[in-house]
Amino acid sequence: MKRRDVLNGLAMAAAVPAMAKVAVAQETEQLKPQKTASVEGCVALVTGSNRGVGLGFVNVLLERGAKRVYATARNPKNFPAVVALDPSRVVPLELDVNNDAQRQAAAEQARDVTWVINNAAYPGSRIPEERRIRSASSLDDSKMVMETNCWSPAEIARLFIPTIINNGGGAVANVLSAASWFCLPEYSSYSLSKAAAMMMTNGLRAELDRDPILVASVFTGGVDTRASPAGTSGGISPNEHAHQVFDAMARGDTDVYAAGSKGMRDMINADPEAFERGRIKRFYESPLTIPQSHIVIV
Ligand SMILES: NC(=O)c1ccc[n+]([C@@H]2O[C@H](COP(=O)([O-])OP(=O)(O)OC[C@H]3O[C@@H](n4cnc5c(N)ncnc54)[C@H](OP(=O)(O)O)[C@@H]3O)[C@@H](O)[C@H]2O)c1
């Protein structure tokens, strides 16, 4: 074979993946339904709305013109402060996301809902070993994390999908985490629950592809809340986070990158193994610690 033929052959071989990439990208665009979700006029239900990221969602829903917000929390003592934000539009609902009777009652009462924001989450035991796989005394706490962060949001979405469709369409936003993409060894159970919730959200999105519901995977990076691990300050405020999420959903994004998670995604894509090694190194040398205040016993 002549040298020129060899070079041409190599050039073609290099071009094929690039062409294939373009074709896949175009096809993806064609297959993606044009769904957008705007807060204005929506009726939203937010889980874990009494503090942190959830309270930020309530604030910004009100600011952006939501018609009504069902602010749910598992402890009614938290209601007065949330309702005081706008008594004419905030409806408090008691909802422990793991309590099936309360989930059913909420779905029964909030029949005008068009948006569900699955925000509530349990980061895991305050005893570090219980958040791990090998070191835990049992997997009971891990199972509770999985229940709270994956199965309960799935149950809530299932309950409200017929309502949302009945009301003309809307959105389901599942608050995940950058830790859906990798394991934080200090929070193994949390990471695995968020990875599972990411796949649960993908499944929902596929099943709702032909329905008027935008299913958003919210990949949150760092937000300053009581749950933020010590040493990870520098996050954005819950209100700023909510604005970023709602801007993305208004554009029709289904993968929503908020609070710096896009940078983390890019780092992982660039070298997944190096990223994982970095997390493991930190785990041994200066592990993240969970703030003592993060769990409120109710
Ligand atoms: N902060 C961050 O940097 C960050 C990063 C990535 C992802 N996220 C995600 O953002 C969401 C909110 O986190 P956050 O930082 O705001 O945490 P947070 O301050 O600990 O708030 C968690 C909320 O979930 C509620 N909750 C927990 N278990 C519940 C249950 N069984 N039923 C009902 N409510 C329950 C809590 O209620 P109580 O007040 O009664 O405990 C609280 O309202 C979570 O999905 C979290 O994974 C946060």
Image: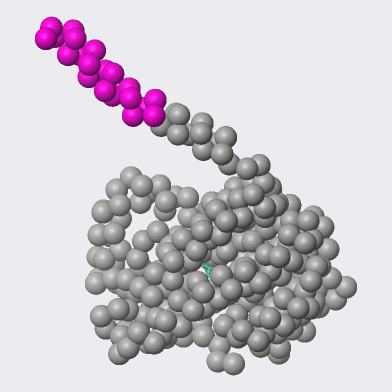
Q: Which residues are magenta?
A: 1-20
Of residues 75 and 12, the one drawn nearer to the viewer in this rendering: 12
Quarter occupied by the N terminus: top left
Q: Quadrant of residue 47?
A: bottom right
Q: State the residue at coordinates (64%, 66%).
A: 117
Left or right: 279, with 296 as reference point:
left
Residue found at the far bottom of this picture: 298
Q: State the residue at coordinates (71%, 90%).
A: 77
Q: Is residue 291 visible?
A: no
Q: State the residue at coordinates (71%, 65%).
A: 162
Quarter occupied by the C terminus: bottom right
Residue 122: percent from the left, percent from the top?
50, 78
Q: Quadrant of residue 140?
A: bottom left
Residue 269: percent from the left, percent from the top?
36, 47
Q: Is residue 99 visible?
A: yes
Residue 7 colored magenta?
A: yes
Residue 195: percent from the left, percent from the top?
42, 64
Of residues 166 and 24, the one drawn nearer to the viewer in this rendering: 166
Left or right: 91, with 245 as reference point:
right
